[in-house]
Image (cartoon, rainbow, N blue to C red):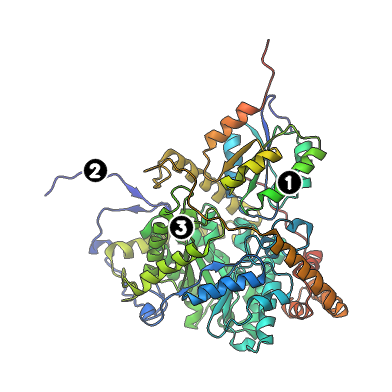
Amino acid sequence: MSQKKTLPPVVWESGLVVKPVYTAADRPAAPPEEPGAYPYTRGILPTMYRERPWTMRQYAGFGTAAETRERFRYLIDHGQTGLNVAFDLPTQCGLDSDDPMAEGEVGRVGMAVDTLADMEEAFLGIPHDEISVSLTIKGSAVAIMAMFFAMARKRGYPLADLRGTAQNDILKEFVGRGTWIFPVEPSVKLVVDTMEFCARNVPRYSPVSVCGYHIRESGATPAQEVAYGLAIASAYVERALARGLPVDDFASGISFNFDVHGNLWEQVVKLRAGRRKWAKIMRERFGAQNPRSLQLRMIAGGGGGGLTIEQPENNIVRGAYYALASALAGTQTMALCCYDEAYTIPSEHSARLALRTMQILMHEVGACDTVDPLGGSYFVESATDEMEALIDRILAGVEAEGGIVQAIAEGRIQAEVNLQAYELEKKLRSGETPKVGVNRFVEQEAERPVELHPYREEEASKQVARLAQKRRERDGAAVERTLAALRAVATRGDNVMPAVMDAVEAYATIGEICGELRAVFGAYREPIRF
Amino acid sequence: MTTAPGKIRVLVAKPGLDGHDVGAKLVCRALSEAGMEVIYTGLRQSPAAIARAAAQEDVDVVGLSILSGAHLPLCRRVKERLHAEGLDDVLWLVGGNIPARDHAALKQLGVSGIFPTGSPFAALVEFVRAHVAREPEPS
């Protein structure tokens, strides 16, 4: 026997303790699991990437619709297989480009959209049967989704066949990111309106991508990220069921968005455990039968919270590890933050590097060779079990205190993750949590070699002028009529989506549409805590 | 509510539409742990509302957190509103995603201290303490 040495403990962010070695004894009675079969721990498909490699979908969009379309074309020409649309803050907050609060923000962090005309311009010539589009929109999602559907239909793509995704997870927006508009309850109602509308009219579209991502970015641990994400998704399912929709008619329209940064193994096991837990929730709690209702489909990668301002090129290397973790965890779609994202809207150069990072992984080093390559590892399987148990405990805690919607409405989740973010920041400052370039291997740095994305005031003015012109050209009576109808529908508590579709087709603006809804639902007031 | 005399009063505000508030909340906590009285506005405040709050709360320091890149247009409007409220002398700080090339323009507007993402809390606390005159020294 060798001499026993005491090794320093390894504890993951979620609190799980990692042993130096794992053996068969760690999982004596584990049932055999197969990929593509319930509970899908090893992946949602029997062949995974051998048959269907992940979709690469970088987040892009800035300025006017025409400028954004150029970047879309650039990404498609370089081999990107899906689009992930960024909208500017006024669009995300349901404000027109000429609103006083929009000053200085038009087209800055994404594409400006005021009316259907902007959506038509952005996607001109982009084939919707080949390139799937993800809309990163929340508070104003009913208007933006309606514009996207109206645009596709006008261009001859029947809604019955239209594929794509909207982020549209408003509950996480109250925890982090903050582009809410309406109070919590009506906000959730609007999400469920889109789920119902899509189940009936756009059945192949995924109307909600539940984001653990931003909750993690706000300070949650990986286990909390997955647990809160599953709790939020369950809340949407409950409300859709309460409308009498059969679970298998809408459940496959829910997908997930998870964050990958931090400990490599912890990220892999949180996603494997999350996939297993979701399958169990859907089958055992909600009675879903269709395999597609049970399968947790995700976009993973990103990892913004792991990137650093210091030594920005290190972020390219981090991105490669995040991509590897995402592939090892069996994600369906991948997007990576660009190395300059802590400073600016990514340059073409850095956006291409992120894309190349994923392409090298897919085409060069064998990440797609076999399904769930870590499956059966004593360590990974045992840690997956422990992570699932931890997620269970967090979920039970949320339920015991009145559920996730109430916890978010009262600001309890926010208070918890904010405190954790502060504790983590202190550990980074003190060096207790190692971070290369920040508290290890620090260098004195001069000006950073990062090219800053220019904000062009004239593009913003162009957008405001374009909006004014559209207001003049459109049929004012039709706008008034459809907006009045929308207000009536919202007041009755009916599904607003058909009325929003009518309004966008009359070229009502996003500000007008959200204004009607605000008049009925009121505006959110955030609980001020820090 | 009364506050201990001599406590430095700080308003932390999020102007504009940017919803990234992790940093602002970290700063709030760090300043209050350092013994300051911190008032946080929450998201989506207009420059007018921020200046009004600064006047009503009688603060020594106004700190803006901006990550969207809109710091120059926003700070121009905040400056006008601070002036309108008679707050030209308030210690004005800006934090967030503020590239070095814009620092001079912000200083020109009257911003006293710029604390880009990643600035240590200690530096911020020290800066505030050095610039806010508290109780006059007994002579």
Percent x, y for residue A436? 39, 47
> Going 57% across and 78% down the picture, which residue do you hit?
A164
Q: Quadrant of the N terminus of chain B?
A: top right
> Going 59% across and 52% down the picture, which residue do you hit?
A414
Q: Quadrant of the C terminus of chain B?
A: top right
Residue lying at the far right in this picture: please name it: A477
Q: Is residue A10 left or right of residue A194?
A: left
State the residue position of label 2: A6
> Going 63% across and 41% down the picture, which residue do you hit?
B104
Percent x, y for residue A144? 68, 73
State the residue position of label 1: B76
State the residue position of label 3: A222
Q: Which mark is residue A280?
A: none
Question: Mark 3 falls on what kind of element?
Answer: helix
Q: Residues within 10 Å of mark 1 (few under 14, many from 20)?
A: some
B31 versus A32 height, above or below: above
